[in-house]
Amino acid sequence: MSDLVINQLPGRTFAWLGVNEAVISGLEPYEALHEKKELSEEILCTRKAKTEVYQIPEGCKPGKPAYLWFAYDRSAENIIEIRAGRDSEITIVMDHSVLLQGTEKSLEGHLVTKISVEDRAKVKLIEIRKAHAGVRFVDELHVECGERAGFEITQLFLGEGVFYQDLHCDLKGYESTFLADTAYLIGKQGKLDINYVATHYGKKSVSDMKLNGVLREQADKIFRGTIDFKHGCSGASGTEKEDVLLMDPTVGNKTVPLILCQEENVSGTHGATIGRLGKDLLFYLESRGMTKAEVYEMMARARIDALVKRIADERTRSAIWAEI
Amino acid sequence: MSEKMIEIENLFVDVEDKNVLQGVDLVMGKGETHVLMGPNGAGKSTLGNVLMGSPFYTVTEGRILYKGENIVESPVHERAQKGMFLSFQNPVEVGGISLSNFIRSAVAARTGERVRLWDFKKQLASAMELLSMDPTYADRDLNVGFSGGEKKKAEILQLLMLKPDFAILDEPDSGLDVDAVRTVSKGIREYQNLHKEGTMLIITHSTKILEALHVDGVHVLADGRIRENGDASLIEEINQSGYERFLK
Amino acid sequence: MNTENVTEKTIVSDINRSVYDVRNEDKDAYRFAAGLTEEIVLQLSQEKNDPEWMRDFRLKSLEIYNRTDMVEWGPPIDGLDMEHIVTYVRPKDNKMSATWDEVPVEIKNTFDRLGIPQAERESLAGVGAQYDSELVYHNVRKEVEEQGVIYSDLESALHGPYEEMIRQHFMKLVPPTDHKFSALHGAVWSGGSFVYVPKGVSVEIPLQSYFRLNAPGAGQFEHTLIIVEEGAYLHFIEGCSAPKYNVANLHAGCVELFVGKNAVMRYSTIENWSKNMYNLNTKRAIVAEGGKVEWISGSFGSHVSYLYPMSILNGRGAKAEFTGVTFASEGQDLDTGCKMVHNAPDTSSYINTRSISKADGINTFRSSVVISRDAAGSKSSASCESLILDDEARSDTIPAMDIKCDEVDVGHEAKIGRISDEAIFYLMSRGLSEQEARALIVSGFADNVSKELPLEYAVEMNNLIRLEMVGSIG
């Protein structure tokens, strides 16, 4: 069994920081992920994975979201390809919480998703992940957007498991967009290792990444966020904002927000705020009678709630409220 | 003078090594409404915030007796649970918590009991109506994206729902248009009606908001000290001649 | 394998190769191995009349150098002739020192435009003429001596009453094991300043390394060691705006600052190495309780730079500030930034950098902010802005924060963009040409540094910018 090297930082830095990449032993890399290869029978058969290909026809705009449930037992791999045809619009909800908890066993999930959003299509992906200790979930997601195509992803990570998330969005087309809205609340010995890369090729492409999270107990987290402006993406704009609430002295947080730029006419900004709650916020909430501990619990929960409220689909929202 | 709610004795306050209040004395009785006025930068807001226990200021000398107890060392949430309230001049935005849920948690903290949802929602709706607030604001995140006027109204809404024993209003009318000032004033009068034993300290440097209110005492704060204590007629004098005579 | 260079053979004597046999087949390793030898280092040490401990130190460093790999990130250093690295160390022997005639035309032109006096020019170009600044240097020395301040060159200080003090501090902050070029530095360091400021002394005038430009060693492997005792204050200025030219194109210097309790150390630099140079510099400060280090840094020259001044906040309440501007133009690949390490409670770090990329210049801002478990109450705030001036330029921002404590307040923001058309239009409507408008805007952009520098330096820095942007001054 080989090692899977994921979450690679597009601009490597001081090695001792330990953020240049993540190496996961016992998992196999999936070569075709970053190429334009079709998921042929041949490729699918060489892996013992469950694979699915979804083609959304041109112009198709179903009013309701599509729900994908995943069945895992001890360890499982899923490979999914989604092709959204021109002018189509779809919301897909991928819920892994059903399978990742409920049992006390250790579980390993590996999901590889490849999405192509063709010209003027819009794909919204909602992913909920809740895992107890003993669960390791590795997710590789590669998205490519055509002209005026849009990809939006809402991600929620909860619990004490170990999560790896590698997300690449190539904004190939003119005015293509990528929006990421992520929240997390990781506790106990949980671990979250994320790598978001927005690569701007197309002129006037837009990317925006927002992360809002909470770390408690001995949780450990690495967030790498890259906005990469390639030569020729004139008029592009990229923004990145991370907000991390640290609740216990034993947490570990690494934040690596990158902006790589080879194009003159662009605008890129990123911001990160890490630490405890601001004094002014604490004062305001305490002045209404809440103890410091109560305020922290409320605010930790509020970050998750804020994200859930932004999920348009009622059914998904209720499912999440029921879970947490 | 009825039983004392607040007694401030020789209070000295620093902010970041700068001495802002230099020996403030002030007494307010139960059921009374007092007004604190003074030129900009005098330290009025500082006093209001220090009474509530703001972490941004340090009390270097003096006492603050609340219902006879010195609260200078008391943590903020305890002061609130004992019945103190501050309506902030620039309330913070708190994403992820709805206005309604927030007030409910605050009421629970104040009374120490669980709040019955149905009763609460009714009370909230009627208070919001009194303040001409759009009912959909109840479900919006606390202060997020609220205009200046709406933020101030949300503070007065909390005043009405929490019914504190001692309410400090820090410039409740700053940045508001004429209608909004009237509405806030209405809210303040409603509080006075509902809670006759309640004491109020209104910090302001404009007098519009005081027009329809009954005022028991007026105090002028300038250069870190109380320069004059008087009654409602002082307001008129300030309107006419400003603060000049207090600055000598 | 490779063809062997005849000159190489006459210098390198036969040594038991097994000691230096590098076991991997890597091409680079081969190049490095055929470079510096123990004998050369010994010779150097002897010439300098090193005390025994220093000689041993050099040898140990050489050993470390030979077994350390180059880092796997950062600009390529292919242009460095590592095979003949010995030539960097012994330029005269290898007839590497130029005559004035051999100094490249662009360098001479820059001197001309910046109005540098002739005598100074030769010194800056390493041609070795005696320079008047020696006199200025001696006068400054006398003045501060009265306060008990020691300001001398490091080599002679090694033979005086301060030998023990130097021994206790030398390369303790930047050990040879740190990276390949600090190991090289440890083996062949030459020249540099030693400054000692006693307790409570405030040095009113800034001390400058510029005074000692023509010191032996040509400034390539200079070591600056500064000790500021409790409650003292010092401002040290390194470099100058005129390009420092050297045919041997490596600068692997080292700066170590020891900042005592409640002391303040301000270290200003304008680095303008000529555009053939590889500037692999290591600068580090360690700050005790209540102390503060302020770095002011303007990086303009060199072909390739690796420069990350690092501040280690070791005592409660220690502070570090880094204010920098980096300007990368044609043919330049500048990798600069800073590192902050919070090891004690209530420490704070503040980073403010601006970078400008022009023509096909590459600018990489690389930083790290590390807050350890024992650093409760720490604050760190970083602001990095990048300006891209044309189509071919490149600017990368690679910051990292590693936080192992919850009672912290860490903020970071970065922005990248271009000069707004509105700003240019506005300035042009007031009579400036487009070029001049852009030059003015870029100067304004770099003011985070220029306003922290003494006036003459600020003026020089602005002249440098103008030269880059407009090709002339005034």
Image (cartoon, rainbow, N blue to C red):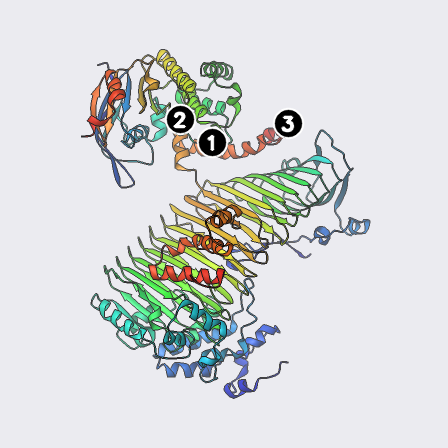
Q: Which residue is mark 1?
A: B94
Foreground: disc 3 or disc 1: 1
Using the rendered view, name the quadrant where residue B47 is placed: top left
Using the rendered view, name the quadrant where residue C26 is placed: bottom right
Q: Which secondary structure, mark 2?
A: loop
Residues at circles 2 and 3 in contact by the CB criterion of under 8 Å = no
Foreground: disc 2 or disc 3: 2
The kind of residue tagged 3 is: Glu
The kind of residue tagged 2 is: Gly
Q: Tell me which residue sits at (35%, 18%) in the image.
A: B209
Residue C189 percent across, percent down from the top left: 41, 74
Q: Which residue is mark 2?
A: B175
Q: Which secondary structure, mark 3?
A: helix
* Quarter of the C terminus of chain B within the rendering: top left
Is C38 left, or right, of B30 in this rendering? Answer: right
Q: CA distance from mark 3 to mark 1?
A: 24 Å
Chain letter behind tag 3 = A
Of pointers 2 and 1, the one earlier in the residue sequence:
1
Is C235 left, or right, of A178 in this rendering? Answer: left
Q: Residue furthest right?
A: A41
Q: Specify the label residue A116 is tagged with.
A: none
* Quarter of the N terminus of chain B within the rendering: top left
Q: Residue furthest bottom?
A: C10
The kind of residue tagged 1 is: Val
Bin the neighbour count of mark 3 within 10 Å (Cα to Cα): few under 14, some 14-19, many 20 and up: few
Question: Which of B213 and A281 lies nearest the eye of the viewer?
Answer: B213
Q: Which residue is mark 3?
A: A314
Residue C147 percent across, percent down from the top left: 21, 65
